[in-house]
Image (cartoon, rainbow, N blue to C red):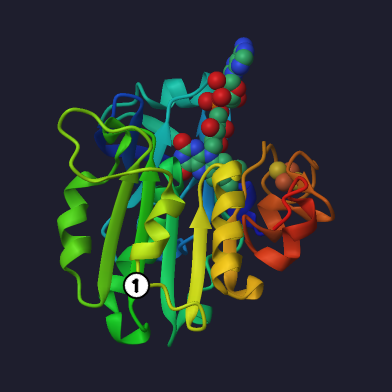
Amino acid sequence: MVSQVQLTIAPASVAEVAQETPDTFTLVLNLADGRGPKDFVPGQFNMLYLLGIGEVPISIASSPNERRVMHTVRSVGTVTSLLAKLRPGDKLGLRGPFGKPWPMKEAHGRQLIVVAGGLGLPPLRPVILEAIRKPESFEGVKILYGVRTPSDLIFQSEFPAWEKAKGCEFFVTVDRGDAKWKGNVGVVTTLFPGAGIKPSQAVAFVCGPELMIKFVILELVKIGVPKERIFVSMERNMKCGVGTCGHCQLGPNFICKDGPIFAYPQIERFFPKSGV
Ligand SMILES: Cc1cc2nc3c(=O)[nH]c(=O)nc-3n(C[C@H](O)[C@H](O)[C@H](O)COP(=O)(O)OP(=O)(O)OC[C@H]3O[C@@H](n4cnc5c(N)ncnc54)[C@H](O)[C@@H]3O)c2cc1C
Ligand code: FES
């Protein structure tokens, strides 16, 4: 059922803006209706609205235990390029939350494998923060993060905390290094052999470009992670966010309502001839 809060555009104001990379920024928001991060669950998304311009679906990047609601956005088109111009005090609208969250309970008592490609990291950031907060709930946490170049890395100030967190290991790779880069070079799946994944115990949460998701699933299945323990976040163009317009349809599923998080077997047949 569509709730009133999903149809109402809540006024919000920008509290802070953090420039992550030249084209990617984090908006820290205050909601006029008094809601805060605890009202949004990891994996869900909001529609961010600019009056007279339009609305875009953007994942919730904050964890429920932080002080403010955060969204990390890449400027790619009409609405996101105007969101990039917002400064502290500016107003926007927020509709949501929408969608199903990451199934954190499925990972309890198991090894949690978080695989993020590029801008797939923001919806997984709250998962990471929640896992770090409750290390006793997991048989270890492995974060595998891949980007095109070192200048595409976001949330860099948080990496030391992720590296040091109890039970957590953080691996990062770039497709192309630069003169200063001393880390791994290669796509995110090149991190798998050295990551100590225990397939029989693992639960994987995967987010990133669809091609990257396809190859990550291929690798996870190859090393023996059961398909039903692989969860992916999917993206499609959206309009309504509540399962009525059909813009986000994937087979019988509406990504806004039935997703964006799916267990892999739910959507396996819609991956284009994946051979996975
Ligand atoms: C569930 C979900 C979660 C998401 N989470 C995030 C998130 O956390 N952060 C984030 O940054 N994005 C996220 N996205 C993607 C985001 O919603 C889109 O990037 C956004 O809707 C783009 O809107 P826009 O108006 O800025 O771009 P549009 O103007 O709609 O453009 C979209 C694309 O079309 C291209 N384009 C635009 N105009 C033209 C043209 N004239 N000719 C050729 N190409 C053109 C642009 O380059 C761009 O790639 C998410 C999407 C979904 C579905
Ligand atoms: S965005 Fe309208 S059905 Fe999903």
Ligand 1 quarter of the rendering: top right
Can residue 36 be seen at all in this image of the molecule? no
- Judge from the rendering whether residue 250 lies leftward or rightward of residue 20; answer left or right: right
- Judge from the rendering whether residue 32 lies leftward or rightward of residue 4; answer left or right: left
Q: Position of residue 93 (x, y in %)?
A: 48, 37
Badge 1 density bin: few <14, some 14–19, many ≥20, Cα 10 Å:
many
- Name which residue lies at 78% across and 46% down: 249
- Name which residue lies at 38% across and 34% down: 148
Number of residue marks: 1
Q: Nearer the viewer, residue 196 or 58?
A: 196
- Judge from the rendering whether residue 138 lies leftward or rightward of residue 40; answer left or right: left
Q: Nearer the viewer, residue 180 or 125?
A: 180
Can residue 129 be seen at all in this image of the molecule? yes
Task: Say which residue label 1 marks.
Answer: 141
Q: Position of residue 183 (x, y in %)?
A: 22, 46
Question: Which residue sits furthest right?
Answer: 252
In the rendered image, which quarter contains the C terminus?
A: bottom right
Is the CB atom of the residue marked by disc 1 within 8 angstroms of ligand 1's nearest atom? no
Identity, as a three-letter code, of the amino acid under mark 1: Val
- Secondary structure, mark 1, is strand
